[in-house]
Amino acid sequence: MVAKPIVTADEAVELIREGDTVMVGGFLGCGSPPGLIDALEKRGTRNLTLVCNDTAFHNFKTGVCTHVAKLVAKKQFRKIVVSHIGTNQETQRQMNEGETEVVLVPQGTLAERIRAAGAGLGGVLTPTGVGTEVQDGKQVVELDGRKYLLEKALPGDVALLRAKKADKAGNLIFDKAARNFNPLIAMACRTVIVEADEIVEIGRLDPEIVVTPSVLVHYLVRAKK
Amino acid sequence: MEYVASKETIAKRIARIFKDGDVVNLGIGLPTLVGNYVPEGVTIVLQSENGFLGLGPAPAPGAEDPALVNAGGGFVTIQPGGAFFDSAMSFAIIRGGHVDATVLGVLEVDQQGNLANYKIPGKLVPGMGGAMDLTVGAKLVVAATEHFDKSGASKLLRTCKLPLTAANQVDFVCTDVGFFEVRNGTFVLKEYFKPYTVEYILEKTDADIVVDKDCREVEIS
């Protein structure tokens, strides 16, 4: 197995170009890569499209602003594709004032569109959203008497993952509920960067328990302790 | 008769729906309370859509794990025999009919089984999260809601006015005054909760209600 480059978070985010679609793992921040997000905020790359489950927490009253919410607050996204923004008042404000395009996608559809992109599929047929606003503008396909929406695959440019452990080849395991979208976005982007809590030698991860295989991973970053 | 809102009544009644071994997904907020009232002798397996089966109660203070949270971001535990998985597997389980029941909160629910719970245009736009997948995928969809909103208006309607989370997917609606089935485009009153009466419910609810032939008074305690 070939070892992947181990780079710093600052070096890693230089791979993200203006206008890129960036996929970030995490569910309300659980499973988001903190060092990569901070580095991307520091670098200030703009005009990005975010694909993520949600935009984490931003509460105007308490001032709490976590994970990808930091990038939202810095106006680094021109478009945000997520399933939920209820915990981020700034995303809601930017959407309501027309500053940022926000596309809300049912969570299972979002997962499957990302997976489809990484699996070489053009899209998926899902019953989710039939008869709702989600159906607007989409092709409805009827199969064996049931209606489905044709949901197109959703590819990205750069994926930012958090893993519990990586070997130097890029095989990954995750930590409990911090897995969520991380294995999916690793399939769907041309450049996949993983912030790992621990990086071990090749051969030290049991192949039976690897969740994301190494061929999907391009760069490793050591998480700060 | 004075209406007194009671989330506890709703949670207690819904908890009696489940059979031993049912796989259940509880929405955030009022539906989460249902887990506190599952009768003795009935074990349900809770699915957490952020990626595991075997959702357990909140940990003891000091034992919180930032990697073990529920879909609302709250600290939880995992039961022996539980399993973690990614979001595609989580929603394959949900959409694929492997979840027996889901309990979801309500902004509006109507007699066609339509549910609106994710958006008030121009006012509140939290997003649908996993709710649209849960409503089409779970075998049983239970809407949990106080019978009236804060202004006193009926949450059960003839036709939802808000954007729908799901079209024709709701099977049961449980409020703090009664238990309803959605059947053939009407609410069917199955139980009315003490001290409310059938007459009260028919008069105050802005929807068509058929009283089931076996409708009965139930004391929720």
Image (tube, coloured by chain):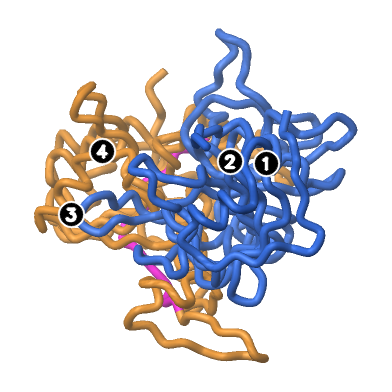
Chain colours: A orange, B blue
Q: Nearer the viewer, residue A84 or B159?
A: B159
- Residue under pointer 2: B176
Which residue in the protein does label 3 denote? A95
Tell me the number on the disc at residue B193: 1
Q: Is residue B203 left or right of residue B186?
A: left
Crowd rating for badge 3 (residues with CA inside 10 Å; few <14, some 14–19, many 20+): some
Chain part drawn in magenta: A151-163
In front: mark 4 or mark 1? 1
Residue type beneath disc 2: Asp
Residue drawn at (65%, 67%) of the image: B210
Q: CA distance from mark 1 to mark 3?
A: 43 Å
Q: Residue at x 44, y 53 (%)?
A: B154
Question: Which label sits on residue B127?
Answer: none
Against A120, is A176 above or below?
above
Marker disc for residue A69:
4
Per the image, label 3 sits on a secondary structure element best described as helix
Could you tell me the amino acid type at mark 3? Met
Dot 1: chain letter? B
Q: Is residue B183 left or right of residue B79?
A: left
Element assignment for label 1: strand
Magenta stretch encompasses residue A156: yes
Q: CA distance from mark 2 to mark 4?
A: 37 Å
Q: CA distance from mark 2 to mark 3?
A: 36 Å
* Chain letter for mark 2: B
